[in-house]
């Protein structure tokens, strides 16, 4: 029964992916301002284009108050703007599997300068600093799904409880598929970091349980 449910869930996710492929026009959001040495205020804008079934690629654009373009980055999966004493640093992530910036550029008010070699290692910290809320929400949802699964597995397969258990497992399976799909396709959270962290915590949990059993016995 469970394999059939898994197949149905997979088909649901696939259909959802196809149905969500409706195109939409580019959109923008403000990311702050920068005061140039000559007193000119530079607007920092996040410019998104349609990503179809994936997250919308973003470009960081710098403009004058009248809308004239000063400089802009290329469109990437994710970009984090960091203000420093010397100017604005833009950390660009081509993909989020391994959250290390593919390119880092510094804006001095006039041009973008490549500083990737000196900032690549720092980009890992910048990624977690910029998306710590997303990581907390993702981990919390994963814990809830895991707790529901464990609780449902503990329900005895007798009478009406068997139906409750089956319906619950189907629900958790569907929610799990959408959860994984959202992380891989849309979320700025790294699946590799989550998977590695989860594996470490699970191994730590198993080790604690073994020690407790040894002490009790």
Image (cartoon, grey):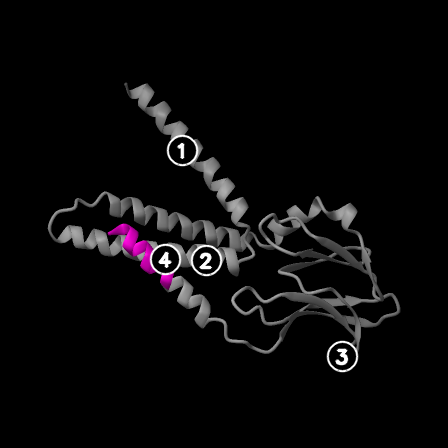
The crowding category of the residue bearing disc 4, from other C-alpha atoms within 10 Å (few below 14, some 14 to 19, many at least 20), is some
Q: Is residue 154 above or below residue 168?
A: above
Give the percent coordinates (x, y) of residue 82. Answer: 71, 57
Disc 2 to disc 1, C-alpha distance: 26 Å
- The first of marks 1 and 4 along the sequence is 4
Asked if marks 4 and 2 touch (Cβ < 8 Å), the reply is no
Label 4 vs 2, first from the N-terminus: 4
Residue 185: x percent and y percent? Answer: 52, 59
Question: In the rendered structure, which disc, 3 or 1, sits on the residue that comes first in sequence?
Answer: 3
- Report, in whole angstroms, how far the alpha carbon at label 3 lies from the one at label 4: 43 Å
Q: Which residue shows up at 22% across the image and 53% down it? A: 166
Residue 117 x %, y %? 78, 47
Q: Which residue is mark 1?
A: 205
Residue furthest to the right: 38
**Rendered view: 19 above or below 13:** below
Q: Which residues are magenta?
A: 1-11
Q: Mark on residue 181?
A: 2
Q: Looking at the image, which is closer to me, 184 or 12?
A: 12
N-term-proximal mark, 3 vs 4: 3
Choose mark 3 or mark 4, whichever is in front: 4
The residue indicated by pointer 3 is 67
Q: Is residue 50 magenta?
A: no
Q: Secondary structure at mark 1?
A: helix
Q: Is residue 150 left or right of residue 181?
A: left
Judged from the image, the secondary structure of the residue bearing numbered disc 2 is: helix
Q: Tell me whether circle 1 and circle 4 mark residues in contact (CB < 8 Å).
A: no
**Residue at image location 16% in from the left, 50% down from the top:** 162
Give the mark nearer the N terminus: 2 vs 1: 2
Disc 3 from disc 1: Cα separation: 55 Å
Q: Is residue 20 left or right of residue 166?
A: right
């Amino acid at each position: 029964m469970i394999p059939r449910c898994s197949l149905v869930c997979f088909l649901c996710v696939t259909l959802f992916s196809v149905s969500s492929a409706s195109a939409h026009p580019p959109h923008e959001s403000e990311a702050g301002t920068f005061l140039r040495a000559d007193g000119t205020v530079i607007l920092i804008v996040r410019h998104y284009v349609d990503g179809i079934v994936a997250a919308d690629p973003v470009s960081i654009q710098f403009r004058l108050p009248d809308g004239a373009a000063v400089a802009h980055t290329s469109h990437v999966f994710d970009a984090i703007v960091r203000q420093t004493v010397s100017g604005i640093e833009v950390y660009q992530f081509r993909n989020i599997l391994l959250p290390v910036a593919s390119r880092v550029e510094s804006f001095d008010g006039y041009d973008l300068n490549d500083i990737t070699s000196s900032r690549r290692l720092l980009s890992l910290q910048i990624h977690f600093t910029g998306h710590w809320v997303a990581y907390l929400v993702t981990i919390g949802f994963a814990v809830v799904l895991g707790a529901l699964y464990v609780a449902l597995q503990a329900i005895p397969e007798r009478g009406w409880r068997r139906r409750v258990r089956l319906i619950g497992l189907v629900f958790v399976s569907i929610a799990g598929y959408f959860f994984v799909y959202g992380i891989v396709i849309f979320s700025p959270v790294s699946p590799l970091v989550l998977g590695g962290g989860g594996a470490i915590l699970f191994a730590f949990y198993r080790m604690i349980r073994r020690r407790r059993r040894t002490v009790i016995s």
